[in-house]
Image (cartoon, rainbow, N blue to C red):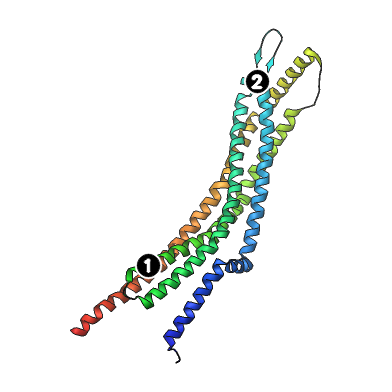
Amino acid sequence: MTPNPPARMRAVAVLLLSAAVVLSAGGLMRKGMDAAGLGRLKASNDAYLSASFDKALKTFGVLSAVKVGLAVVQGSDVGIGFNLEVGDVVQSAYDYVDIAWRVVLACAAVLLGTRYLLQAADLLSSWFLAATFAAVLLGLVAAWVLPRLRFLRSFLRDAAWTAGLVTVALTLAVPFSVAGGHWLSKRITRPSVEQASDGFQRIRTELEGPRTVRSGLWGKITEGKEKFELVAAVIARRTGELTEWVLKLIAGFVFDCIVFPAAVFLALYAAVRRGAGVIRDGRKRREFRSDLAEVLRPTRTEG
């Protein structure tokens, strides 16, 4: 017996949704989206995060060298018959560099964590997409087989909307937030960060100075005094620039690694959620009118 059109359409819908669940769980749909353009976005984000992480490690190494040089002089004693504690001379400079050192280290960890987050989002998006199709499939079956259980249909619709929203966030909002942060970084903070990094590199070179090794007690004393005078001269000459570079470095890395990506993600997530809410509210109003008409129909018949 040939099934009537509604039954045929139901069978087609079940087959299509079942295939979508299987393809999504197997990652084939994700591969299709990558081929459609998301793969290029993924490669661009990975290259950006790798380059940013390498730059953060390089800057961290420069700051570590400057910090060690200042720490050595900070704890030095210079003089014969009396001790001249030179730590106070470089204390403020050491504090500035130490703050920048900690911030750059934290931002490097954030960059590495962002790479892991993108990998996790890429993996989980397939499962949430499969859960979305599965919830839609179960909702249709429940509407056909158990039409009186409205709470079950409502629960499955809410589950489908939630899983779909998470899928969009993982598939689009997360990678586009990184890409948006990259775009903002290139146009706003990158020049300041590069200027600050080059400045610290110059300070590192100046603090190292000419390498002269002296033997004997008097040679060591002279070497320590010359080192102190070199560091004091460099710090005195670079005090204003050092403060500026520290502030630019801290602000640049914080905005690049945290503020820009988080702001773009929140904006995209709010837009997606708002759009989904508008569609969902319209659908709920239509379903409410349909359910109300279905409930009132017997009363009108009896009247």
- Measured along the vertical axis of the image, is residue 145 above or below residue 262? below
- Secondary structure state at the residue bearing disc 2: loop
Q: Residue 224: image x %, image y %?
A: 73, 18
Q: Residue 39: image x %, image y %?
A: 63, 63
Cα distance between the residues tagged 1 and 2: 68 Å
Toward which corner of the image does residue 74 lie, by quadrant?
top right
Q: Residue at x 21, y 82 (%)?
A: 300
Image position of 303 (left or right of 227): left
Q: Residue 10: image x %, image y %?
A: 44, 81
Q: Residue 212: image x %, image y %?
A: 81, 23
Q: Amino acid at mark 1?
A: Asp
- Secondary structure state at the residue bearing disc 1: helix
Toward which corner of the image does residue 37 lie, by quadrant?
bottom right
Toward which corner of the image does residue 283 lie, by quadrant?
bottom left
- Image quadrant occupied by the C terminus: bottom left
Pointer 1 and pointer 2: residues touching (CB < 8 Å)? no
Numbered label attached to residue 75: 2
Q: Find the residue positioned furthest to the top.
A: 81
Within 10 angstroms of label 1, few (less than 14), some, or many (20 or more) residues? few
Q: Which residue is mark 1?
A: 281
